[in-house]
Image (cartoon, rainbow, N blue to C red):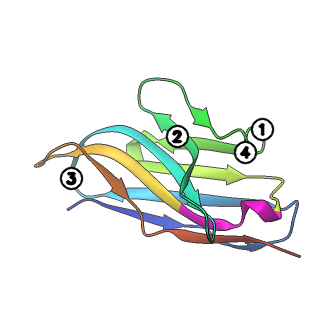
Amino acid sequence: QVQLVESGGGLVQPGGSLRLSCAASGIIFSIDSMGWYRQAPGKERELVANMPTSGSTKYADSVQGRFTISRDGAKNTVYLQMNSLKPEDTAVYYCNSILTPRYGRRFSYWGQGTQVTVSS
């Protein structure tokens, strides 16, 4: 069974940095993309950054130049380096991956979410 396990959230002051990690576990045949979404209280979930296996990386305008997404293909892991954090970046961050398990169908998987709070 495939699972996405996130780590790295926490409390940080404005201007600080955090690094989120998300590892896909289980027997995986192929990964189409890995990325990050976030949901702030009272708001809809929104794309933060997405990195397809083939194609261009996409960032939300609000994080362009401050956040960097990267992947380790050997570890089926995606990272989100967040710099120059602002209070408006406060949200629950969710990892997402579109992948095909070794025994199963292509599907969009979600992590459990990790809280990021930017506050002084």
Crowding around mark 2 (Cα neighbors within 10 Å: few <14, some 14 to 19, many 20+) is: many
Residue 94 on image: x %, y %: 50, 60
Q: Which residue is mark 1?
A: 65
* Horizontal arrangement in the rendering, residue 34 relative to residue 26 (left or right): right
**Do callouts 4 and 3 mark residues in contact (Cβ within 8 Å)?**
no
* Left or right: where 68 falls relative to 118: left
The residues bearing labels 3 and 2 have C-alpha atoms spaced at a distance of 22 Å
- Which residue does the numbered mark 3 point to in the structure image? 27
Residue 8's image quarter?
A: bottom right
Residue sitting at 61 percent across and 69 percent down?
A: 42
Q: CA distance from mark 4 to mark 3?
A: 32 Å
In the rendered view, does 68 fall on the left or right side of 99? right
Disc 2 and disc 4: Cα gap in Å?
12 Å
Taking depth in this image into account, of 39 and 94 the one nearest to the observer is 39
Tell us which disc is closer to us: 1 or 3: 1
- Give the structural element (helix, strand or loop) at label 3: loop
Q: Are marks 4 and 1 in contact (CB under 8 Å)?
A: yes
Residue in the image at 15% along x and 45% along y: 105
Q: Nearer the viewer, mark 4 or mark 3?
A: 4
- Rounded to the nearest angstrom, the CA distance separating label 1 from label 3 is 34 Å
Q: Residue at x 53, y 25 (%)?
A: 56
- The residue stretch that appears in magenta: 87-93
User: Residue at label 2?
Assistant: 50
Residue 63 is labelled as 4
Query: Whole-percent x and y of residue 77?
Result: 45, 50
Q: Residues within 10 Å of mark 3 (few under 14, many from 20)?
A: some
- Which comes before the other along the chain, label 1 or label 3? 3
Q: Residues within 10 Å of mark 4 (few under 14, many from 20)?
A: some
The kind of residue on which mark 1 rests is Gly
